[in-house]
Amino acid sequence: MMNRILALFLLTTAPLLAQEPSADRIQKHIEKLASDKMKGRGTGSRENAKAAAYIARHFRKYGLKPLGEDGFYQHFTAKVRRVVVLDSIRKAANVIGFLDNGATHTIVIGAHYDHLGTGNQGSSLAENAQGQIHNGADDNASGVAGLLELAQYYAKNNVKEPYNLLFMAFGAEELGLLGSRHFLNHPTLPLDRLNFMICMDMIGRYDPNRGVGIGGYGTADAWPDVFKGVTADIKFFTDRAGNGGSDNAAFYAKQIPVLFFHTGGHPDYHKPGDDPDKIDAKAEEEILRLEIKLIDNAMKLPKMTFTPVK
């Protein structure tokens, strides 16, 4: 009898547990997106388009609603700021999936999926950068892996949340936040319906001495209440500023509250050495568990009021 009860318990809880953030899945996403075959996911490249298709395929698998202008895709033209090659005008796209809970307001969860390609975009910090593959495992395959894990979690947790969730993989961030700025100038959902934005950029190289930084703490009156009593198996700290770092800055400029998750700089930043084998996937799993706690707390509260950070 006891064995039957245990089997029934495992059967009923397994689907829910399977949707929890997983270090194994995180590592697999990063190894796929940051392999040498992907050639650094430079904006306008075939490999960048493959990365976008990989994300769209998972959004579809999770049952998200396409909210681009072409299915999951929102196409735009990106211009390379520091021209090293002749093709300074490149095709790019955001990948946008919507979890519709029938709510009035929506939370945005985002990460950029582009990187520096083979060193021809002009922002590599390596010597003799041209021709070298910049895999961008931490920057920002780690953030995309987090985006996919959170999309799966919320789409498959069998809970109708009090807010909708908009999952966005931004293109051309490395060229100047072009993807997030394009969305904000051509929104596929009214901006006044957005509650706040969560941004993940470089969350794969956790340093226990530093902890994960969470920027944007000062961008809404409600963030102190959201963080109250929250604990994690990793070290974290907050920073009030919300107008720097990554695509969160574009949302901050539109007076939308933000949180920006980042595990800090390292010697491989914008260099060919940013490879998947240096990722701490278990720590990233814990970062995502922390994010879920914060998002869940925020969803218990009314729509936030933006506060500028002086």
Image: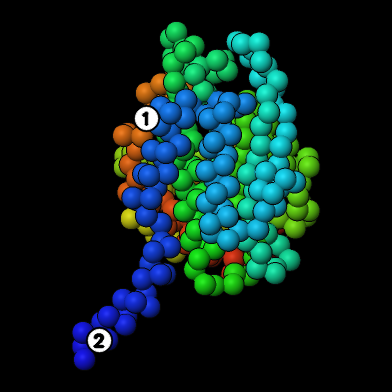
Q: Residue at x 50, y 17 (%)?
A: 119
Residue drawn at (73%, 33%) of the image: 76
Q: Quadrant of the N terminus?
A: bottom left
Amino acid at pointer 2: Arg
Residue 264 in view, yes or no: no
Q: In this view, which residue lies farthest toward the left?
A: 2
Is 266 placed left or right of 71 in the picture? left
Residue marked by disc 1: 275
Nearer the camera: disc 1 or disc 2: 2
Identified at 41% across, 51% down, the residue is 287
Q: Which residue, given by chain and number where applicable, does mark 2 sit on? A: 4
Give above or below for 54 relative to 267. Answer: below
Where residue 161 appears, as percent x and y from the top left, is 59, 69
Mark 2 Cα-neighbour bin, 10 Å: few <14, some 14–19, many ≥20:
few
Residues 180 and 135: in front is 135
Question: Disc 1 marks which amino acid?
Answer: Asp
Q: Between disc 1 and disc 2, whose residue precedes?
A: 2
Tell me if 133 is positioned left or right of 47 in this view.
left
The label shown at residue 162 is none
**Split into 4 quadrants, where in the image is the C terminus?**
top right
Out of 133 and 167, give the one closest to the viewer: 133
User: Element under label 1?
Assistant: loop
Q: Indicate whether 178 appears above or below 222.
A: above
**Disc 1 to disc 2, C-alpha distance:** 46 Å
The x and y percentages for residue 163 are 64, 65
